[in-house]
Structures are given as structure tokens and as C-alpha cells.
Image (tube, helix red, strand yellow):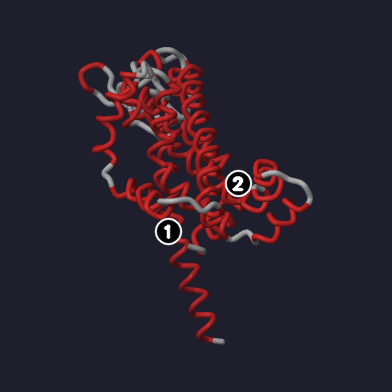
Amino acid sequence: MKSLSYRRLLFYVLTGLLAVIFVAPLLWAVISSVSPHAGTSQLNGVGFSNYLTLAGYGLGIGVYLKNSLVVSTVTVVTKLVLSSTGGYAFARYRFRGKRTLFVLVLSIMMVPYAALLIPLIVWMQTIHLQNSLVGVGLVLALFQLPFAVFMMRNSFAAVPKELEEAAFIDGCNSFSAFLRIMLPPVLPSLVTVGLFSFLAAWNDFMVSLYLLSMQHAPLPLALVNMRQQTMGVIDYGLTTAGVVVLTIPAGILFLALQKYYIKGFTSGAVKG
């Protein structure tokens, strides 16, 4: 009993310490965004001047948020469609070169991010998708696709084949069996893939920097220009206000889907 209490106390101490480490930067950003800073619009007392300045900065905060939302939506939809169909094919179908193709897909995860970026930029220029929000969404989906296919393949493999065979006996074809029988059991994994995709696309900076002009900038890219004011002074108030606005949608989505995220991650990771 004493050993159990000691372990529980140690658990609470460690998890509490980790919570402080992760929450402290966000809490500092919130406090800093409403606090006065030299060289910023918030000069005296606590207030929301930084948020008012942010709302009217450049093209307007609404345009930057809309651009981020478009990129994230394209990434999530593309990744869900490709990873679910690809994972289903690898889990259920037999075809020549299946194992080699699956290893080739997984090997893309070993390639450094920057090594793929430059060829992709040239490719996007060729198909006239440079400076396009849709193009950025497609590139981000491609970067994240190997792990998503791996995860969905494991999730589909964990579904009993008898369910699919019963659907064929009842008259379903492959497509209807996929939609009506196979997708519902792997819904937590689909939600996890979608959540990861949204968070990665919502916070992306590197791909947007290479492919987009400031007229099409999502919020993370716009924040870089916001931070520096005259004489090289960094506007911490305005920057942290932007960070808080950027964090709110991702935080709400994560909290709303966290139960699916936990189920999906474990079901997709155990069976290989």
C-alpha cells in the first residue's frame, strides 16, 4: 500500500511538472499579449490593444486565418482520402510488388524534409500551383502521407475479415463494403490522422515560405513580418497576440477530439 501511494505521488509530481513545462510558454504568451511593452501599441496597463492592432495588420487577421483554413482543409481532405484507400489496399488486397511498394512508401519517412522540398517546388512550378493555397495543402499532405498510410493499414488489418466477407455475401461490392463496413471500425484512426494533418498544416511555416507570397500568406507566415517594427525592435505584444490567436482553433479541435485521438493512435500502432 505504501509502495502504491509512493508511486502515485511520484506519478502526480512528474505529470504535474510536465504540465507546467508545456503550459508555461502558452500562459506567458497570453499574459504578454495583454501586457505593456516598449515600442508596441500596448504601452500602459493591461488591455487588448495588441489584438486590435493584429486585427487590422496587413491584409487583416481574417484573411490570414482564412488562408490557413484553406491550406489545412486541403491537407486534411487529401490525406484522409489517400491514406484510407491506400491503407485499405495494403491491408486487404494481394498484388505483385505489394511488400516492395509498402516499404518504398515507408522509406519516404527516412528522407529529410528539406531534401524533398526543393524538387517539390520545381514540380509545383511546372504544374502551375506555386503561390497557390491548394498547392501548399497538397505538398503538406504528401509529406505526411507515409505515416498515415502505415497507421491506416494497421487499423484496417485489425478489422476481422469475416465482417467484410459477410458484406460481400449480402450483396456489397468492394466500394460499398469499404464505405459501409470497413470505415466505421477505423473511425478513431481516421480522426487521429485528420487531427495530426490539421495541426501540422495549421502551424506550417517552411512550405508556405517557399511557395507563397505575402498576398496569400497563412497566419504563421504573417507572424514573421508582424514581429519586427521600426529600428529593429521586436513587437512582443503583437507577436504573442498572433500566437494566441493561432493556438485557439488548434487547441479547441484537439480537446474536442482527444478521446478519438487516444483510441486511434493505439489501434493504429499496435498491430503491424
In front: mark 2 or mark 1?
2
Q: Amino acid at mark 2?
A: Leu
Q: Quadrant of residue 235?
A: top left
Q: Is residue 181 above or below residue 157?
A: above
Q: Amino acid at mark 1?
A: Leu
Q: Secondary structure at mark 1?
A: helix
Q: Which mark is residue 257?
A: 2
Residue that badge 1 annotates: 18
- Residue, x 40% and y 18% (percent of image)? 132
Q: Is residue 76 above or below residue 187?
A: above
Q: In the image, 19: left or right of 182?
A: left
Q: Earlier in the sequence, mark 2 or mark 1?
A: 1
Q: In the image, 136: left or right of 178?
A: left
Q: Would you say residue 245 is visible in this rendering?
A: no
- Residue, x 53% and y 82% (percent of image)? 4
Q: Is residue 142 above or below residue 93?
A: above
Q: Would you say residue 212 is visible in this rendering?
A: yes
Q: Quadrant of residue 252?
A: top right
Within 10 Å of disc 2 (Cα), the crowding (few <14, some 14-19, many 20+) is some
Residue lying at the far front of the rendered structure: 96
Residue lying at the far left of the rendered structure: 231
